[in-house]
Amino acid sequence: MIRTCLTAAVAVALGLLSIAHSSPVNIFEKPTLQKRSSAHIIRECTVPGSFAVTFDDGPSAWTHELLDYLKIRGTKATFFVNGLNYNLITDPEFSAVVKRTFDEGHQIGSHTWGHMSLAQPTTDVSSQMRQLDDALLKIIGVRPVYMRPPYGETSPSALQWLGDNGYKVVNWNVDSRDWQHPLDFKSDFEGYRLALQNPAASSKGYISLQHDAEQATAEAFGMLAIEYVLSKGAKIMTVGECLNANLRLMSSLNNTIGNLELKDPAGFLNNKFVTNARSGQRFSIFDPARGSEIATCPDMNVEEVEEAIQAAKKALPEWGQKTARERSVILRKWYELMLENEMDLAKILTWENGKPLAEALGEIRYGAQFFEWFAEEAKRLYGEIIPSPAQNQRMIVIRQPLGVVGVITPWNFPSAMLTRKFGAALAVGCTVVTKPAAETPLSCLALCELGRRAGLPEGVIGVVTTHAHTKAVGKHLCESRDVSGISFTGSTAVGKILLKQSADTVKKMSLELGGNAPFIVFEDADIDKAVDAAILSKFRNSGQTCISVNRLYVHSSIKDEFGERMRAKVAKFNMGSGFDKGTTHGPLITEAAVQKVHLHVEDALKQGAKALVGGDFDDKDSAASRIGYFYPPTVLTDMKNHMRIANEETFGPVAGIFTFETEEEAIELANSTRMGLAGYFFSKDMSRCWRVAEKMQVGMVGVNNSAISSEVAPFGGVKESGLGREGARQGLEEYTQYKYINMGI
């Protein structure tokens, strides 16, 4: 079973800087959590891939929150108890939280400050410290880790005493606020330099250096530390390099000798992960909940996409000639592997996309269903026998794979959009070259690893990761004479470009493009059900779905009641990291997305709309001062049809309520756009349901329902929302071509 290397990976997500060195020397920048106080400070790593926390004021609700957070993240920490707080040993709550911490796999440690440092083991290891450590020994059954302060003298005999009594020794720096003078960091650094050279200390554990990135003097101190370590031959790695070289994205099933196989963020060519682009360039992937880099991928270009195309072309004959059943077996195995590893895949998805973990898990399960569906549908790729008008002829139509297909996927559903395309293309015998979204390539790479385990032959799938060369890679896929079709999910503007670029080679195009979905609530609707459905569609993935409600048309007689009920529910939303317990809605994907949503809301408010909830985003705060890419869930009323929200896809957590008077007006408003992906309406009148459903100019209609996506139903739009259909049996049409055979007898 794959396991994301979250112990180390979370350290990267929290913004750590790692040093690779033959001796146990590590330098880490100070990480921060959104919930942090001066009494509970996240400290430097004591073990690579972990971090330390102090119980400076004893146990609290915050401690339990952090334990819950670490449990979700899958990482381990070392919790230190300050020796000055030895009186905690009489607190039953303290014993309970220490036991929980230890039982959940974290280390327990103790530390003291300078005036209690160990000059002599018999005098400076205070009775208070002994009492605390004895209490910890009784609670957890082992001696705690001892953290040695870097200032003050620590004699070799004291270190020996600690070692003889079962302690593991780690060195700790002072925080910037502990300095006696803001610029007096050179003397402290000299202490670190000596500590690094102390074999008695370094042999007992890890020596760590830390600086506070918020203080200019601390930054200078950190540079001195880095310069020193560089002088010793260490290699300093960026966060992304650290992930690529040390942390590894995911592990696999134990092999026959019990070792774990690990995979790096990379491209995927010929069933091999390619960690470096020929250009030598890399691009960053960010955690949108924090705005911090979590990994880097090779920034590939036309050379790599051509290599992938030729590999797919070479693999096409053998893959296309396999029986439908043989391909079905591989797809079915891929489906099973996704479900076996669903939580790992969900964590990767949440990490790079930001959606809440439960929602990410739902996407993984939904995406896996496309492999299951097409594994079966592959065996039903029927042809046709045509009754011949001539007695000496037989007329047969067979369906054959289109060929090599270029697949370009979005970031909002980085797993399900791939499986929906992969499943259909591979089921009929096509091979695929994929360009995943630069914001979310890790989910694609994880799926490729599982596909390889499921038995995909070399070259059947190629993945080209790129950011800087996105336009060039897309253009090459469209213009290549060795690529027979393009399947793209994304914006209408980009879809039009790809359509034009594919014209010269007359490719078959499958385009699932932008939407501007109307949601009509007639006066006879069940208001509670309509509100729940509107919220589900509008705010799922924080409004970042192509079929998300963009325009809410509510009959004027129930507008106020509808708005109030929606306001009350939206006000209870909790925005935050998808890994945090209690988060209902995650961040937007980028800062640019936040600014677009803000412009839409600002435009509406300036033109007379009213905010029932939300809408209080302060763009005066710089993006650098905010943590993550969040916009408050917003409900607007008194909307007008000339506002930007009415005419542009917002792609964010903003619901705008418009009004109408008649059925004819509602239909006219709903159809007053060049987009036509999805539409919804609520009514108890059965005749009206048929009339409105047939008149709405969209590819998909939800009647008294907004959860319309399914692997067994055709997904796609009309007008400028796309060409073709995905999912269902119609999904196979996009990747096959008909061949008519006339046989004389």
Image: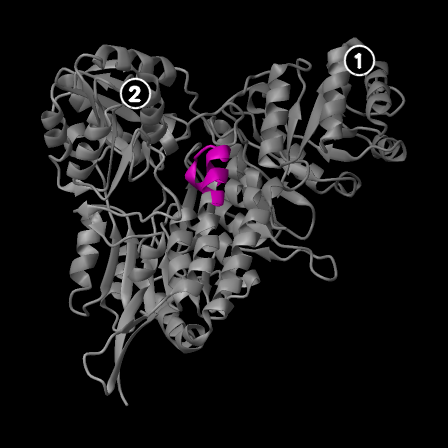
Which mark is drawn over residue 89? 1
Identify the residue shown where x is 87% and y is 25%: 121
Identify the residue shown where x is 20% and y is 64%: 502
Q: Nearer the viewer, residue 711 or 67?
A: 711
Left or right of 335? Residue 482 is: left
Left or right of 284? Residue 256 is: right
* Quadrant in the picture for the C terminus: bottom left
Amino acid at pointer 1: Ile
Mark 2 element type:
strand
Q: Whole-percent x and y of residue 356?
A: 47, 32
Q: Whole-percent x and y of residue 196?
A: 69, 41
> Quadrant of residue 99 in the image?
top right
Residue topped by disc 2: 634
Q: Whole-percent x and y of residue 568?
A: 36, 12
Q: Nearer the viewer, residue 688 or 720?
A: 688
Amino acid at pointer 2: Thr
Identify the residue shown where x is 75% and y is 17%: 96
Prevailing SS of the magenta stretch? helix
**The magenta stretch spans which residues?**
351-365
Q: Earlier in the sequence, mark 2 or mark 1?
A: 1
Q: Magenta span has 384?
A: no
Q: Whole-percent x and y of residue 133?
A: 83, 21
